[in-house]
Amino acid sequence: MSEYKLYSLFYDEQMLNIGEPPIKLIEPPIQSTYTVEQRLITIEDFATERVIDLDPKFRVERNAVIKEFTKYDIRQLLEDVIGKERIVRIEPHEWHGSFLVTINEDAKRTLELWIKVIDALKAKGIRTPIFLYWTGKYDVTPEEHGRIDALALKKMGLALATEKSFNASEWLERD
Amino acid sequence: MVRKRLKLYYCDTNILLSFALESENNHAKAKQVLTDLQQSYIYISPLTLVELYTSTCRRIKSGNIRFVKELQKRIDLIPGLEEKCHYAFSLIRSYIALSLNIKIIEELNDVVEEEFLGGKVSILKQYKFVLDRVPRITLKTLDLFHIFYAHELAKRGKEKYFITLDKEIKG
């Protein structure tokens, strides 16, 4: 996996005087620098896309690696975990070289199967991201849905992100 | 054997949000700091959760936020704006909980008396704290409440830190 060099933790530290006891105030460093070591890039690196974000020259190679992914019999694995009769379609997707799988199930059961699929893929050393969708009813609470989606993303090594970059202070709109 | 001094960190909402979302401008910094502090105690407050929830919900309801493709697709599948808000907050909160070992400062409901409009009234301790410091510290309301929680944490007598991306607090 990628080796990220660590950098100085804090560039500034000062005391905030609000009465006793004082609190030390810390702001993270202004700049963060990453270094990718010279080495062969593994499939796992591409699955998380972090290497690609760091070094755009690997983008072209990534497509070749995704083709390599398809050599694994992902369909067979999906059929084993989900059941052949439930699978409606499997589509490749551009986001992180992932696959979208639609199954004949309600949302709750689909989410449960999703976690099983991810675990089965990981057990075989395959780290290509897969997203499961349902054709049935939405029978899960949004809270539970959010919790399972977060778990699935963590297991696949994917991060949450918005389409456009933003600033936390603007998001929070403190007043 | 020398015992390592326990360090307590109070984490501002902006750092937590920045950590959770890769597209936030300071994500790399926030991730670095919070990941490196995993051996310490990182605290947030109920205010952090409320602030995170209200701001996320406001953005979802105003249509002022779109997640990356597959995440947005999942949000779009959820019926109802209120449900989308619940989902988005649950997603962010769960992601943070799965990624970091964070503790929540329990709500302190101590009541104190304060002179107000010619008479004494009972108010929560945190309001008294904020009112007492307003003339000395020119900060926004929520910033002052976060300072209160950091102050409460600091009372535990250990090394204590307030982590923020907020330049006004720093200033």
Image: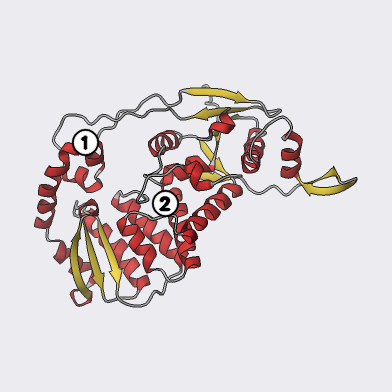
Choose between A66 and A42: the one closer to the eye: A66
Q: Give the answer, above or below, for where A169 lies relative to A90.
A: above
Tell me the residue at 46%/69% (across/down).
A141
The answer to whether residue A156 shows anywhere in this view is yes
Crowd class of label 2 (few under 14; some 14 to 19; many from 20; radius 10 Å): many
On the same chain, marks 1 and 2? The answer is: no
Q: Would you name the residue on which mark 1 appears?
A: A55
Choose between A72 and A58: the one closer to the eye: A58
Image spot of residue A10 (x, y percent): 45, 25
Secondary-structure class at tag 1? loop
Cα–Cα gap, marks 1 and 2: 26 Å
Q: Would you name the residue on which mark 2 appears?
A: B95
Disc 2 marks a residue whose amino acid type is Tyr
Crowd class of label 1 (few under 14; some 14 to 19; many from 20; radius 10 Å): few
Secondary-structure class at tag 2? helix
Tell me the residue at 62%/43% (across/down).
B142
